[in-house]
Amino acid sequence: MTEALLELRDITVEFEGFKALNNISFNIQPNTIKVLIGPNGAGKSTLCDCVIGKVRPSQGSVYYKGRDITALTEYKITQAGICRKFQAPGVLERLSVFDNLTVAAREQRSWVKNLHGRLSQHERQNIEDVLARVGLTHKRDVQASHLAHGEKQWLEIGMVVVQNPELLLLDEPTAGMTSQETAKTAELIRQLAQDHTVLVIDHDMSFVELLDAPVSILHQGQLLVEGSMAEVRNNEEVINVYLGRSH
Amino acid sequence: MSKNASNALGFVIALLGFIGLFMAPSYLSSYNLSLLGRFLSFGILAVGFSLIWGYTGILSLGQGVFFALGGYAMAMHLVLVQADGALPGFMARSFRPRITELPWWWQPFESAWFAFAMVLILPTLAAALLGILVFWRRISGVYFALITQALVLAFTTLIVSQQTYTNGFNGLSNFTTLLGFDLTSNSVRRGLYIATVAALLVAWLAAQWLARSHFGKLLVAIRDGENRTRFLGYNPTPYKVVVFAIAGLFAGLGGAFFVLHAGIISPADVGVKPSIEMAVWVAFGGRESITGSVLGMVLGRFLAEDISSRFPAIWPMLLGAVFILVGTVLPRGLTGLFERLAVLLTRSPSSLASSDSVQEPFVTPVTASANTPSEVSHD
């Protein structure tokens, strides 16, 4: 077995006594898709928060390429190659679509180097490619706050893609999308997985099925079961807690 | 594309305004020219205020401190020129403590060039230091505003209490000469006025350039989603420190010009109340527009001069009314109003609704998290 790109070891996250994550171990192999599903409050977003440093676990560690990143500052984790799309679209509302992507695409993050200098040919090309990929080329000069919800989702996916991170965390990428848009998103994610590692969090079953990837079910801060969609579907326990037939 | 058009229009209007200002000596009396110079000094401060508040979302209620640092640095030199080698009058008269020799930290201000350097360095350094201390701890919003207000209070209290070294509440005044020029002569005052407009123009151009750079885009990004920029791999702290230091620099420069025009600087010019007034007038002009902020500030100083001397009882109420007006119905100030009018005049009514749909709250932007449909359905 190859070394996992991301590995969570015995992670526990407590919010004032409530265990949002309870002793979770979890890993993702390079260049694969993994899907995390579970009912609301199961701890899916908290798991993402832990990886990117938004929430610090009370126990356990996060390893990325074998390196302990549990205590790194948020921006250093991102610079290491992990990028997240948030659940509520985290676009920069008052910048144009193009500028949103510019901010994400800049290879320079330091203030001195952002004082001068235009976009490099490479950066510009990268932005144009992503614009076309997420279908927002014709809206490049529109202020992000004027986009429809689905378009904001696309823009944010674009902001993640344009950074070309090794690991993408996509938190409910299809929320608020039509079924057509959802299918398009699934297609994009599968393309990305050819040379990226993707962790998708969602609970839209039809979307998850389109991804055709291994699924982990999270319930009350614990991993319930892992397996293919078909296996998970027929698991008694999953049916009980997730579909809520009996409780 | 209308945004670019309105940007271009704003640029043209501002340049015309500058031409008008440069020609003012030909149509204003010497007294009024000096008065305008004083207002424009606050305009230089307003450029920086717009950068930190309008662009980056940092509300400082303590810009008076940086204005004072520049102003006092300038005034200390002028006082020493006037004393002509002797101890300045207020020091000679002081008896608690009685001093016979110029304090060591006053001595270098004998040199005009040292004083000019300090006008630029002191406020920038002070602002950078405060920024590092506070922004590194991720203190922002209302808490930052309160800290700066406390700072300006402490600063003016310190000046007032150190009567022997600062002439306390009376401030520094009674000076007439700079670099051998007689500051009371009309031709020198004209030159001084032109220098003030030139300084404002330089500050304005620098701010415009900064706002259009990637740095400027990052400032807006930090204002609208500081955490979001962190998760895009940026460390927002240095950006905030740098822009706050730039605002400090502009404030100090404004303070120095103010001293030259007004002939005095005292704690009453830079305390808590003037510092809050600065924020009110910047908001009135439209903090998200550099030009608008300058206009609001200059207009505010003009009103302060005019109305407060004629109807002193009405002034505080008017100030309060402006504050409420801007806080409730005009969050983008006069600039926002003009932009709406421009849209109304040039475009069909249907596009009006979307032109100003994002109205930022007055003090701290709050990011609302949208509840997504699919999230609800599985509850």
Image (tube, coloured by chain):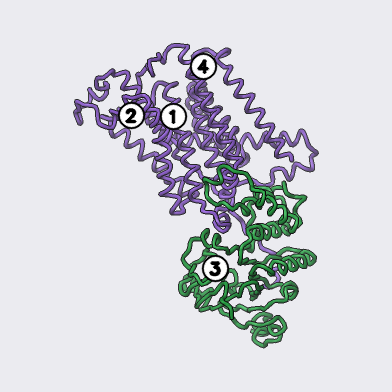
- Note whether B101 is above or below A136 in the view shown: above
Q: Nearer the viewer, residue A244 or B102?
A: B102
Q: Which mark is residue B255?
A: 1
Q: Residues within 10 Å of mark 2 (few under 14, many from 20)?
A: some
Amino acid type, mark 2: Phe
Same-chain check, marks 3 and 2? no
In the rendered structure, are the residues bearing label 4 and label 1 in contact, judged by CB atoms less than 8 Å apart? no
Q: Residues within 10 Å of mark 4 (few under 14, many from 20)?
A: few
**What residue lies at 48% left-to-right and 73% top-to-bottom?**
A61
Q: In the displayed structure, does residue A192 sit left or right of residue B169?
A: right
Amino acid type, mark 3: Val
The residue beneath circle 3 is: A51
| Closer to viewer: mark 1 or mark 3 | 3
Q: CA distance from mark 1 to mark 2?
A: 17 Å
Q: CA distance from mark 3 to mark 2?
A: 56 Å
Q: CA distance from mark 1 to mark 3?
A: 48 Å
Of labels 1 and 2, earlier in sequence is 2
Of labels 4 and 2, earlier in sequence is 4
Rendered location of residue B66, percent (x, y) = 42, 36
Q: Which chain is purple?
A: B
The residue beneath circle 2 is: B169
| Closer to viewer: mark 4 or mark 3 | 3
- Note whether B236 is above or below B190 in the view shown: below
Q: What element does badge 1 sit on?
A: helix
Amino acid type, mark 1: Gly
Q: What element does badge 2 sit on?
A: helix
Q: Which mark is residue B32?
A: 4
Q: Which chain is green?
A: A
Which quadrant of the rendered structure holds the N terminus of chain B?
top right
Q: Residue furthest bottom?
A: A236
| Closer to viewer: mark 3 or mark 2 | 3
Amino acid type, mark 4: Asn
